[in-house]
């Protein structure tokens, strides 16, 4: 069966969004290590809404972000957030063997059946294309095992941190976090009247970049949104729950 333009488009879109996820949500690697499924990660960060994609593409995008993309169908080729192939393989095996809640299983089944009916994504590929896609992806990920195999846990964490920096992930300083929060409390950076939409994230993003990054677009609107979601407003005290990114 020949791969259709729509199927190729879906694969390329997943690869494109996967690259954006590496920039905007590098913390999804820790989510995956902590047992979150692709569907749970997509729902936690509202990826379908943020990137205007369906859940199926969101899940495949997460796989691309975590394990890298092999450049199929002239999509961009890049490495994954989890560089150690042995770790990625182990985590994947753990995820497959872990019991999932009935709600998650049912939702995954619905997504799978819909994709199968419509012959979208991987379900629309021929047997040969499907095998080649998996084989090439495995080879691309396997290459990244060199130099990482045999590392200690701390060494892998440090390698991951350096990889994030090489991808343009400039870590948040305490001063930058405090500044962003103070802007969110300033009426000049509010819009509308509804409490849940009163923060003007675009203006906050621009000001944070102006003050801390010489006007360069280091922080995106999505990154600012993610930043505020990592905070809990408990009796007026905001507590950071995530990690530097």
Image (spheres, helix red, strand yellow):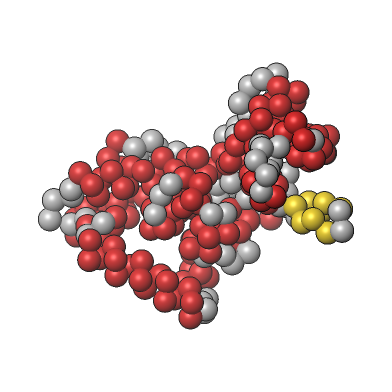
Can residue 67 be seen in the rendering of this structure?
A: no
Q: In the picture shown, does residue 24 fall above or below 54?
A: above
Which residue appears at 63% of the width and 64% of the height?
Answer: 34
Where is residue 193 drawn, in percent x and y?
68, 44
> Quarter of the image holding residue 191?
top right
Q: Is residue 71 left or right of residue 58?
A: left
Q: In which quarter of the image is the N terminus?
A: bottom left
Q: Quadrant of the C terminus?
A: top right
Where is residue 190 drawn, in percent x and y?
71, 37
Can residue 38 be seen in the rendering of this structure?
A: yes
Which residue appears at 29% of the width and 70% of the height?
Answer: 113
Which residue appears at 25% of the width and 65% of the height?
Answer: 116
Q: How many labels does the image show?
A: 0
Q: In this view, does 133 lie to the left or right of 48?
A: left
- The front one of 199 and 38 is 199
Where is residue 155 drawn, in percent x and y?
69, 48
Where is residue 50 drawn, in percent x and y?
51, 46
């Amino acid at each position: 069966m020949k791969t259709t333009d729509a199927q190729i488009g879906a694969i390329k879109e997943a690869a494109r969004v996967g690259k954006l996820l590496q920039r905007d949500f590098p913390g999804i690697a820790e989510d995956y290590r902590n047992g979150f499924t692709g569907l749970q990660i997509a729902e936690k960060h509202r990826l379908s809404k943020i990137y205007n994609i369906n859940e199926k593409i969101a899940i495949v995008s997460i796989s691309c972000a975590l394990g890298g993309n092999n450049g199929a169908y002239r999509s961009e080729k890049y490495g994954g957030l989890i560089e150690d192939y042995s770790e990625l393989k182990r985590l994947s095996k753990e995820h497959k063997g872990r019991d999932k809640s009935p709600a998650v299983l049912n939702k995954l089944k619905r997504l799978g059946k819909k994709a199968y009916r419509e012959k979208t994504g991987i379900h629309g590929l021929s047997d040969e294309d499907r095998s080649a896609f998996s084989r090439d992806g495995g080879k691309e990920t396997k290459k990244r095992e060199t130099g990482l195999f045999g590392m200690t846990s701390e060494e892998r964490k440090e390698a991951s941190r350096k990889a994030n920096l090489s991808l343009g992930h400039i870590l948040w300083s305490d001063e930058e976090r405090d500044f962003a929060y103070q802007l969110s409390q300033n009426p000049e950076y509010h819009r509308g009247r509804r409490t849940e939409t009163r923060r003007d994230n675009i203006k906050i993003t621009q000001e944070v970049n102006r003050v801390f990054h010489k006007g360069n677009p280091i922080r995106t609107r999505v990154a600012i949104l993610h930043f505020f979601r990592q905070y809990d407003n408990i009796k007026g005290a905001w507590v950071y729950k995530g990690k530097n990114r």
